[in-house]
Image (cartoon, rainbow, N blue to C red):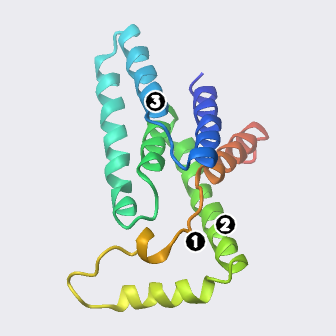
Amino acid sequence: MNKLLVLLLLVIAVCYDRKKKKIPNFLFITGILYCLLTALFQKDISQMGRCIFWFFLIVAICWPLFSFRAVGAGDIKLLGTMGVLLEHALFLQTILLFLILSGIGAFGILWKRGLLAERMTYAWQYITDRRQEKGLYYSRERDGTDMTMILTPFLLAAYLTVLAGRWCNIW
């Protein structure tokens, strides 16, 4: 049931993200409430604690990506919700494949838009700059939106690929 719920949440997130460039909070609230209510009905208070702990742990681990504007807050909350609902191995396989797919996608988008050399140079300068106050790596006002991308389709593709691989006993 959790795998189907995650699939449904991801499909809805892709639709919202493509249309409005945001992932609504009701998606992660639905996933967390499902986890908490399932634990409550099973009378497993420790499972409720684990649900809350894992969500906040995943959000905390991903927070640096948000602080550099590499991902949005909705993406992080969605990852936290997935981490709560899925078994650890499935979640980690999905995240690993998601990182690979989104990296390839980012490379392709920058290449197609002719921004690859410019962004690589900027990234190198940003990394090697020794000033204490660097500011944000990405600023919409300074950089525009030419190199931004929607991540949820890559997350959905990774999840479906891992599920198919498990169904076919590939991994």
Compared to 2, does 139 lie above or below? below
Q: Which numbered circle lies on residue 147?
A: 1
Examine the image and state in which quarter residue 140 appears: bottom left
First-in-chain label (3 vs 2)? 3
Q: Position of residue 151 (x, y in %)?
A: 58, 55
Q: Nearer the viewer, mark 2 or mark 1?
A: 1
Residue at x 32%, y 32% (from the top left corner)? 52
First-in-chain label (1 vs 3)? 3
How much space separates mark 1 and mark 3, taking CA atoms?
28 Å
Q: Is residue 83 visible?
A: yes
Callout 1 secondary element: loop
Callout 2 secondary element: helix
Q: Position of residue 162 (x, y in %)?
A: 68, 46
Compared to 76, does 149 lie above or below? below
Residue type marked 1: Met
Residue 111 is left or right of residue 49, and the answer is right
Examine the image and state in which quarter residue 10 appears: top right
